[in-house]
Amino acid sequence: MQVFIEQGYDATSVASLASRLGLSKSALYHHYESKEALLEVALDEAIGSLEGVLSEPGARDGSAGESLEFVLRGAVRVLVDKLAYVTLLLRVRGNSDIERAALDRRRAFDRAVTELVRDAQREGTVRADIDASVATRLLFGMVNSIVEWYRPAGAEGAAELADDVLAVALDGLRTR
Amino acid sequence: MQVFIEQGYDATSVASLASRLGLSKSALYHHYESKEALLEVALDEAIGSLEGVLSEPGARDGSAGESLEFVLRGAVRVLVDKLAYVTLLLRVRGNSDIERAALDRRRAFDRAVTELVRDAQREGTVRADIDASVATRLLFGMVNSIVEWYRPAGAEGAAELADDVLAVALDGLRTR
DNA sequence: TCTATTTCTGACCGATCGTTCAGGAAATTA
DNA sequence: TAATTTCCTGAACGATCGGTCAGAAATAGA
């Protein structure tokens, strides 16, 4: 997964995957039936974890505003915990059936969050002067960009990172 | 460029580029000396335009807060105007010298904006409880994510989009 | 120890990749 | 019209790709 991320899925050869694992190419093929099967495992792990956040109680109970906050924190947590897998998911372009299936599930996830934003606008906790789907996309643009730079070695843990994300997303960068 | 974006640079064959252009492969090679030369042209266009924003007067005159706002609007404008080129730039992973050179220029751009954020924190227009480099990365995570979904056909123009981005980034999604 | 299963190797396959090349058509210049 | 330059074709190149295969080594159970 790390090699996929460093070089990109398409630019990564099965030979370089095997070499990183200290195996021969054919030994790798003994465990996985194709290069794409490796990708599928990673994509399932990533999108499954994100979907899992939506089905936790915190994402359903309480006000829409509270649910939205819960989902955002959950998404940051999943991003950090499953960094490699989610990174791959976010870079998928739909070049095969497997990639398209993952994209479909991502779109369904986005749609669910958009509904949450819309509900929060209706209940008055989220400003209504910005289109819900634009707001959601900007929100997740910010959240998802974490995979581009966050490295677990840093002092900042997932919780602090989520605090920062929520602070910027909900209250903005401007001083009051 | 559109094909590069749809399929990803590595997954795109020169044959499919030529076919989209209605040319033969060798005709394409008459105009560009390699596949990577095409990428280089696009990356130069993208990063050059972004660097251009930094050297406009509005990015230097006025307070740090005003400069930051100007640069953010400029970045959104460049993203929309040069959508295909910037999309490619944002997906570069550093697999070759040309890609690494583009990444270096991107990092320099990010560093300059981070300094702007830091100055704005010092002058008090931007909240200081969030690390400047984290704030910058979140900001540009949001801005850059625009390439993933914005399509010029939509009703929303670059200016309105920039308004929304600035609204979320500076004042947050929460109602007051 | 004999057997059965899992794990692995190295050589090899056809397909596709980016790139080259000799030369033909089309357009431009004189 | 003749000469020159630009633009393009189709066939081919070596390299690398993802994947296969026959069988050897390692492991585990009896």
Image (cartoon, coloured by chain):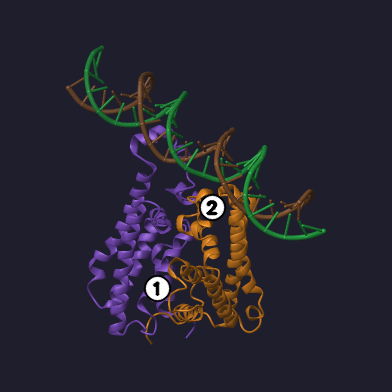
Chain colours: A orange, B purple, C brown, D green
Report whether A30 appears left or right of A140: right
Q: In which quarter of the image is residue B26?
A: top left
Q: How far apart are marks 2 and 1 (CA)?
A: 46 Å
**Label 2: how many Cα within 10 Å (few below 14, some 14–19, many 20+):** some
Q: Tell me the kind of residue under disc 1.
A: Leu
**Label 1: how many Cα within 10 Å (few below 14, some 14–19, many 20+):** many
- The residue under the point 59% across, 47% down is A26
| Vertical comparison of A40 with D8: above or below | below
Image mark 1: chain: B
Indicate which disc residue A18 carries: 2
- The residue under the point 41% across, 75% down is B169
- The residue under the point 32% across, 58% down is B47
Image mark 2: chain: A
Q: Name the image quarter holding the C terminus of chain A.
A: bottom left
Front label number (2 vs 1): 2
The residue positioned farthest toward the bottom in the image shown = A176
Q: Is residue A104 visible?
A: no
Residue B116 image offset from top left, x and y in percent: 29, 74
Q: Is residue A130 visible?
A: yes
The foreground one among A72 and B64 is A72
Report whether C5 appears left or right of B10: right
| Vertical comparison of A95 with A147: above or below | above
The foreground one among A167 and A130 is A167
Q: In which quarter of the image is residue B163?
A: bottom left
What residue is disc 1 on? B166
Indicate which disc residue B12 carries: none
Residue B67 image offset from top left, x and y in percent: 28, 73
Q: Tell me the kind of residue under disc 2.
A: Ala
* Labels 2, 1: one chain: no
- The residue under the point 38% across, 53% down is B85
Identify the secondary structure beneath mark 2. Answer: helix
Residue C24 image offset from top left, x and y in percent: 38, 19
